Amino acid sequence: MKKVILALAIVLSAISSFAQSKRDTKPTLQLVRNATLIIEYGGKKILVDPMLSPKGAIESWAGIQTNPTVDLPLPINEIVDDVDLVLVTHTHADHFDEEASKTLSKSIRLINQPADTVFFEKEGFSNATALDSTMLWNDINITRIEAQHGSGEVLKMMGKTSGFILKGENLPIVYIVGDAILTDEIKETIKKFKPHYIVVNSGGALIQGYEDTPILMEESQTTALIGESGNAKVIAVHMDALDHCRTTRVSLSKKATELSIGTDKLIIPQDGEVITLSR
């Protein structure tokens, strides 16, 4: 019996060590779909802007087809299992949908912008924090950055959005810009924090009736941001998943080629793709 107990203890110890070692590997960023990301960072699994609805479950925003326009590339349980923190840039349905609210534990650790405090209270999330500026969470500095989701009358319609910066000791600095057009504040943020990676929502989304006023960066603004990015690599997401996003992976790649921007500077991941992050 003692031998059996000893063997069991060894097995459990090995399993625990293996699980820990998995979390101690290099940081990674996985594009799930649209702006939904899984970031393994500092030994923690961080889920960003979960839109978990099946294909076609949400209304059309451009009168073309229902959203999202593609399926999730992996099962929902793989996305939400063992999540340590959820970061939400804002609560539009393509960044936090009903499926995410139903699926995630109401006690999960969640960080949101102050403008969405009431939303998460109504949704019953008991461990949500409205981040005004900066906080330290499990040795990771998280800084919220204001974002501008359009301009003029469109900006009033779209409301408040934010981005986040992740910074940990001996870890690459990651700037998640969020839903935004290119602004001087984004340029100043890059100069101040000197990120190693900048995640940009490059879908070039438009609102019906305001087709001349983009609410996201498109090809020209994304490549202009690359010109302001210093030594950072730019990861472009939020494409090929919603009917009101006019910039595609193909059109952005074409624009980058025209400007001689290589894959060493611009990364355009496919849904489900994992990128290893380095300093």
Image: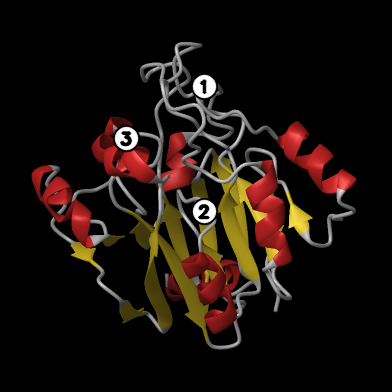
**Image-based side of 33 in relation to 118, left or right:** right
State the CA–CA distance, disc 2 to disc 1. Answer: 23 Å
Q: Residues within 10 Å of mark 2 (few under 14, many from 20)?
A: many
Image quarter (top left, top right, bottom left or bottom right) of the C terminus = bottom right
Q: Name the residue under label 2.
A: 38
Q: In this view, does 170 lie to the left or right of 150?
A: right
Give above or below for 225 relative to 154.
Answer: below
The label on residue 243 is: 1
Q: Label 3 belongs to which residue?
A: 97
Do the numbered discs 3 and 2 sit on residues whose CB atoms are within 8 Å? no
Residue 250: quadrant of the picture = top right
* Amino acid identity at mark 2: Ile
- Which of disc 1 and disc 3 is earlier in sequence? 3
> In the figure, residue 17 lies in which quadrant?
bottom right
Residues at marks 3 and 1, CA–CA distance in whole angstroms: 16 Å
Counting residues from the start of the chain, the first of labels 2 and 1 encountered is 2
**Which quadrant of the figure has residue 196?**
bottom right
Q: Which of marks 3 and 1 is in front?
A: 1
